[in-house]
């Protein structure tokens, strides 16, 4: 494996923070490298990820991405290394922050799609893919079937380039600005999916969730749809976490799975 923009030799060091589906490395004390883990092959499309990266890599709402390529049966992503990068997990979530983050999501959703190869999220197909990673319990099969019945008739009003994984660590702060990062799951999708994702994955206070919805001028009907998407997301991420826990015995996946399962039956 050789990056076009980095001369040999390569000196890799393991990053202090580690990803769930990628190895995170520091290259020559100057670059940040994401290297896919083999376990992600069952649910991630690396070619689609490269297509998305090529579209967004120089946008103002994300940090620069220098290269993305498949080599040695792994996806490699090269970025500048920022020592002072701060995750949203280490910042206070207040209304000013939520307003800034909503703007990032809105800018993403306004990106003009110039590559017809970027995939559209097929919600029923994706739901079955994740559920088939494990043997779901009977009560989860019932929820899956309810969601499929809803999806058979649901028609999104607007399809956009969506991130699809707005967890707290995918927003970072650098030099007084917020950025949206990590494009593993990005596809074309219903614009409401991302709004649901952030509310479900990151926000814990009712007031913050309500303000987040206000920033997108959502109607009551749209909030009802978002609640459907939140149930959908809790189910697929539960199956995802259970599969990874079975494969790795890493307790962080067990913890994520328990949280998603609890959310499903609130």
Image (cartoon, rainbow, N blue to C red):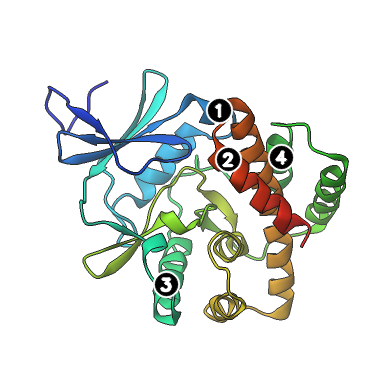
Name the residue: 88% across, 41% down: 138
Look at the numbered discs 4 and 3 and tell me whether their residues touch, using CB distance below 8 Å. no
The residue beneath circle 1 is 248
Question: Considering only order in the chain, which callout, 4 or 1, is on the residue closer to the N terminus?
Answer: 4
The crowd level at tag 1 (other Cα within 10 Å; few <14, some 14-19, many 20+) is few
Q: Quadrant of the C terminus?
A: bottom right
Q: What residue does disc 4 label?
A: 125
Q: Position of residue 180 (x, y in %)?
A: 39, 58
Q: Are marks 2 and 1 in contact (CB under 8 Å)?
A: yes
Can I make out residue 261 in this image? Answer: yes
Structural distance between the alpha carbons of marks 2 and 3: 31 Å
Q: Which mark is residue 253?
A: 2
Q: Position of residue 246 (x, y in %)?
A: 64, 29
Tag 3 residue: 103
Q: Nearer the viewer, mark 1 or mark 4?
A: 1
Crowding near pointer 3: few (<14 within 10 Å), some, many (20+)? some
Q: CA distance from mark 1 to mark 3?
A: 37 Å
Depth check, mark 4 against mark 2: the one in front is 2
- Res 122 visible: no
Looking at the image, how many numbered discs can be counted on the residues? 4
Measured Cα–Cα span from mark 4 to mark 2 = 23 Å
Report how far apart the C-alphas of labels 1 and 4 lie in the structure: 25 Å
Q: Earlier in the sequence, mark 2 or mark 3?
A: 3
Q: Residues within 10 Å of mark 2 (few under 14, many from 20)?
A: many
Local SS, label 3: helix
Mark before the other along the chain sequence, 4 or 2:
4
């Amino acid at each position: 494996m050789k990056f076009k923009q980095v001369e040999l030799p390569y000196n890799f060091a393991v990053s202090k923070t580690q990803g769930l589906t990628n190895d995170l490395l520091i290259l020559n004390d100057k670059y940040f490298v994401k290297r896919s883990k083999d376990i992600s092959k069952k649910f991630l499309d690396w070619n689609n990820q490269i297509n998305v990266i090529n579209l967004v890599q120089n946008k103002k709402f994300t940090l620069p991405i220098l290269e993305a390529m498949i080599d040695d049966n792994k996806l490699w992503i090269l970025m500048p290394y920022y020592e002072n990068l701060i995750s949203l997990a280490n910042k206070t979530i207040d209304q000013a922050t939520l307003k800034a983050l909503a703007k990032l999501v809105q800018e993403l959703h306004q990106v003009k799609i110039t590559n017809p190869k970027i995939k559209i999220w097929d919600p029923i197909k994706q739901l079955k893919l994740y559920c088939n990673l494990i043997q779901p319990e009977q009560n989860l099969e019932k929820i899956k079937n309810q969601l499929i019945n809803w999806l058979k008739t649901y028609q999104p009003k607007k399809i956009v380039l969506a991130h699809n994984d707005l967890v707290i660590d995918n927003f970072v702060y650098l030099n007084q600005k917020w950025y949206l990062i990590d494009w593993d799951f990005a596809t074309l999708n219903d614009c409401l999916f991302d709004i649901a994702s952030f509310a479900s994955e990151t926000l814990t206070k009712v007031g913050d969730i309500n303000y987040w919805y206000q920033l997108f001028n959502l109607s009551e009907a749209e909030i009802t749809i978002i609640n459907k998407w939140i149930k959908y997301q809790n189910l697929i991420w539960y199956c995802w976490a259970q599969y990874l826990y079975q494969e790795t015995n890493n307790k962080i996946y067990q913890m994520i799975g328990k949280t998603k399962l609890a959310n499903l039956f609130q």
